[in-house]
Structures are given as structure tokens and as C-alpha cells.
Image: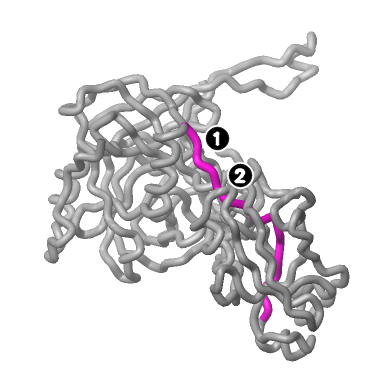
């Protein structure tokens, strides 16, 4: 059984490091490894210290798929969670009106992060569970505790009580250096078939996908390596056997089928590293938050509306009590439609953030994602024809976007 939610493509998005509810910028359906009417999460659901082992980053010659698998597979695990769910009331089959509970079992993948027993997977693999059964390549299974998770990036960290010599951490690469066309290998447990390896290439970069809580995950890696239910949380590795991402979602296109169609998505390891470090240190990850929704301006729109600059973001809404609300940023009060797209006029036009020229929502989210709650952000904007500089103190991202 897969959980399902609707993805809506829109020109507007809630902006911030996790401010956005931006839709997956692809035609057709997307699939979480583990749900959506247009996405499905890649987990299979059945009712009833960093002393890493890997390859030197300066190794120029790529490894064979077999070499990558032999070295990395011991560090890839299968994760099984169980939880009790209440069934809907059935006045005919259950005349007394009591809700019944049944056990739901979920299967996913993960990999060893360090010699301290930390294991990384997707949030949606362990959502609703405090512990999970972790199975290693030597058929050993141990109970691991979920020490923290971050639905905004779909990352979770478990800890297994094992001796360091029993653990094989995977070496991490640099997702910023990944290029389209690079060879990649995915290792996971599709449909419970443990430590299955598939190979492909990096099909595209900088894809935005929607996180389990509705925010946007940026800079996602797209791959054609075959991914299916149960691959969620497993590593995507480069030709040197280094982790460059966590396999998290697949697209179903317009087919409506639940299996692989050659489009999968991996959360970049640079994002994962930042989140995992926070979770290990404090049990949670925090994201800076501005609290606005906005629409990007094109040169054509700027000319049509006679805006003072040919780039920037028109504010559509400002959340009360947020950093933007406290700084008294102003949202547009008039909606004008051009070629089917709606633009808010009469409010602020942001054109720079901390000196970064703003032409897209991604650029603003990038600036904010590099900060922590409580940090200051300098915004340059136009309010009508008046040029204004505003310094805001960023807040903490709420658990879900404002509806």
C-alpha cells in the first residue's frame, strides 16, 4: 500500500530553505520511494566517527560495477519498520463501531554513515517509527533506534549498537562536482530483494522535488538507474564508489504505473551531510525561514508592467509572524494574468538577497539555505518606484508550508 498525495505544478512557490511548496518541475507523475497520486514513496508496504571504506577521491579511473558493488554492498542495509494503523470504521463489518488496528510493515534501504553505528535513510522509510530492524549483507539483523529525522529534506538517521569493526561506512563524494552524463550505480532492496545493484547515468541536475512535508528539495540529481519500491534511502554512487546522493523518488510519467520508467531522483549528498550532522549533534535539523511566497519576473513581464528592474521576485504573500512579516514586507494586492500566469502587483519586488541577484526562486532559497535560524538577511527591493534595503532576522521553518 502506498500513501498518496497530489503534486500541483505552479509558477508560485513558498520561498525559503524549506519555504517552498514548489511542485516537481516535470510533466506527469512523480513517485516517492515510499507515495502520491502523482508521487509514490519508494518503500514497499505490506499489511499484516567517519572512518569510511571506499576509494580515493583522486582516483581517476572509474571502477567496474562489480568492484563498486563488492566494496559498497557491505555498507548497504535493508530497513524494516512496523507500525500500528487504525482502519476506517465499517458499520457493516464492525457493528459496534470500534476502530480496529492492524500492523503495517514497510521495507526500505539505507547505508552506514560512520563507525559510530549511524545509518542514513529517507525520512519516509521510518516515518511514524521509533525503531527499525536493520539487516546487513552478512545476514545479521539488529534493532536500530531512530535518533532524528528531517521531513523537509526526507532524511533520517538511525543508530545501531554494533562494534565498529562490524560496520562498513561508505565514502562520500561531492555532489557539487557531479555532471550530466556521469556513470552512477544504485544499490538497494527493491521489493525486498536485498542488495540489488542497478547502473545508469546522471540524466539531469538541479531538479526540484517535493519533500514529504510539502517543502521543496533543491539541486536534486536525476538518474536513469533503475529504482523501484524498496530502493528508498539507498545510496547513489559515482564511478569511484562514492555516495553522491540518497535515492528518494521516482517519476511515473503519464503511465500511472508504480514501477521504474527511467526517471529517478536522489537527494544530493552535500544536502544530506549538512542535515545528518545536525541530527547527530542535536537530534533534529533546523532550517532558516523567511516566510514569503513569490513569483519570478521575466524581462518581458518587467517591460509589460514597467517595473524598475528586469529581474526579481514579486511577493505574493507574507506569513504573519514570520521574519518577512516582522520586517513588514508587503505582498501584492492585485493579481494580473499574462499568458495564463498570474502576477501579484502592488507589493514589494525583491531583486537582491545578501548581494545575490535574484532571477529565480531557487536563488533565494539557496541564499536562505546557507543560513541558520536567527541569522540576518539583507534584502534589496523596490516598493513602487522607491528603492529600499531591509535587514530581516530569519526564523525557523515550520513543520509544513502555510496552506
Image location of residue 11, percent across then percent down: 68, 69
Say which residue appears at 34% left-offset and 57% top-offset: 225
Foreground of the two, 20 or 350: 350
Image location of residue 293, percent across then percent down: 71, 61
* Residue 286 among magenta residues: yes
User: Residue 303: in sight, yes or no?
Assistant: yes
Say which residue appears at 57% left-offset and 44% top-offset: 212
Q: CA distance from mark 1 to mark 2?
A: 19 Å
Which residue is labeled 2 in the image? 213
Image location of residue 261, percent across then percent down: 44, 58
> Dot 2: within a 10 Å radius of its alpha carbon, few (fewer than 14), some, or many (20 or more) residues?
some
Image location of residue 395, percent across then percent down: 64, 48
Q: Quadrant of residue 351?
A: bottom right
Looking at the rendering, the stretch of residues picked out in magenta corresponds to 283-297
Q: Earlier in the sequence, mark 1 or mark 2?
A: 1
- Disc 1, SS: loop
Of labels 1 and 2, the one closer to you? 2
* Residue 287 among magenta residues: yes
Foreground of the two, 334 or 256: 334
In the drawing, what numbered circle is on residue 1?
1
* Scheme of colours in the image: one colour
User: Residue 252: in sight, yes or no?
Assistant: no
Amino acid at each position: 500500500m502506498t500513501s498518496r498525495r497530489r503534486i500541483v505544478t505552479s509558477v508560485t512557490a513558498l520561498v525559503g530553505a524549506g519555504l517552498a511548496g514548489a511542485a516537481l518541475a516535470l510533466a506527469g507523475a512523480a513517485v516517492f520511494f515510499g507515495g502520491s497520486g502523482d508521487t509514490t514513496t519508494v518503500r514497499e508496504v505490506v499489511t499484516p566517527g567517519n572512518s569510511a571504506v571506499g576509494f580515493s577521491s583522486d582516483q581517476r579511473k572509474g571502477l567496474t560495477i562489480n568492484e563498486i558493488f563488492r566494496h559498497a554492498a557491505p555498507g548497504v542495509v535493508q530497513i524494516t519498520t512496523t507500525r500500528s494503523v487504525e482502519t476506517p470504521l465499517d458499520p457493516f463489518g464492525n457493528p459496534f463501531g470500534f476502530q480496529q488496528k492492524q500492523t503495517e510493515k514497510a521495507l526500505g534501504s539505507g547505508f552506514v554513515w560512520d563507525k559510530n553505528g549511524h545509518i542514513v535513510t529517507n525520512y519516509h522509510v521510518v516515518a511514524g517509527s521509533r525503531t527499525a530492524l536493520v539487516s546487513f549483507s552478512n545476514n545479521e539483523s539488529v534493532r536500530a533506534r531512530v535518533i532524528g529525522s528531517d521531513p523537509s529534506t526526507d532524511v533520517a538517521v538511525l543508530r545501531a549498537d554494533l562494534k565498529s569493526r562490524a560496520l562498513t561506512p561508505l565514502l562520500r563524494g561531492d555532489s557539487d562536482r557531479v555532471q550530466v552524463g556521469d556513470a552512477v550505480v544504485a544499490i538497494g532492496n527493491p521489493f525486498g530483494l536485498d542488495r540489488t545493484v542497478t547502473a545508469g547515468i546522471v540524466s539531469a541536475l538541479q531538479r526540484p522535488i517535493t519533500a514529504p512535508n510539502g517543502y521543496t528539495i533543491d539541486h536534486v540529481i536525476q538518474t536513469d538507474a533503475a529504482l523501484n519500491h524498496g530502493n528508498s534511502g539507498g545510496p547513489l554512487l559515482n564511478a569511484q564508489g562514492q555516495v553522491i546522493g540518497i535515492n528518494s523518488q521516482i517519476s511515473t510519467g503519464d503511465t500511472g504505473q508504480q514501477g521504474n520508467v527511467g526517471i529517478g531522483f536522489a537527494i544530493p549528498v552535500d544536502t544530506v551531510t549538512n542535515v545528518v550532522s545536525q541530527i547527530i549533534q542535536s537530534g533534529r535539523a533546523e532550517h532558516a525561514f523567511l516566510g514569503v511566497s513569490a513569483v519570478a519576473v521575466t524581462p518581458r513581464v518587467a517591460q509589460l508592467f514597467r517595473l524598475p528592474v528586469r529581474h526579481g521576485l514579486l511577493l505574493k504573500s507574507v506569513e504573519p509572524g514570520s521574519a518577512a512579516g516582522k520586517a513588514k514586507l508587503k505582498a501584492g494586492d492585485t493579481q494580473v494574468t499574462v499568458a495564463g500566469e498570474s502576477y501579484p502587483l502592488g507589493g514589494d519586488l525583491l531583486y537582491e538577497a545578501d548581494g545575490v541577484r535574484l532571477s529565480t526562486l531557487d536563488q533565494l532559497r539557496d541564499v536562505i539555505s546557507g543560513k541558520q535560524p536567527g541569522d540576518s538577511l539583507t534584502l534589496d527591493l523596490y516598493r513602487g518606484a522607491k528603492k529600499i534595503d531591509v535587514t530581516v532576522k530569519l526564523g525557523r521553518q515550520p513543520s509544513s508550508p502555510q496552506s
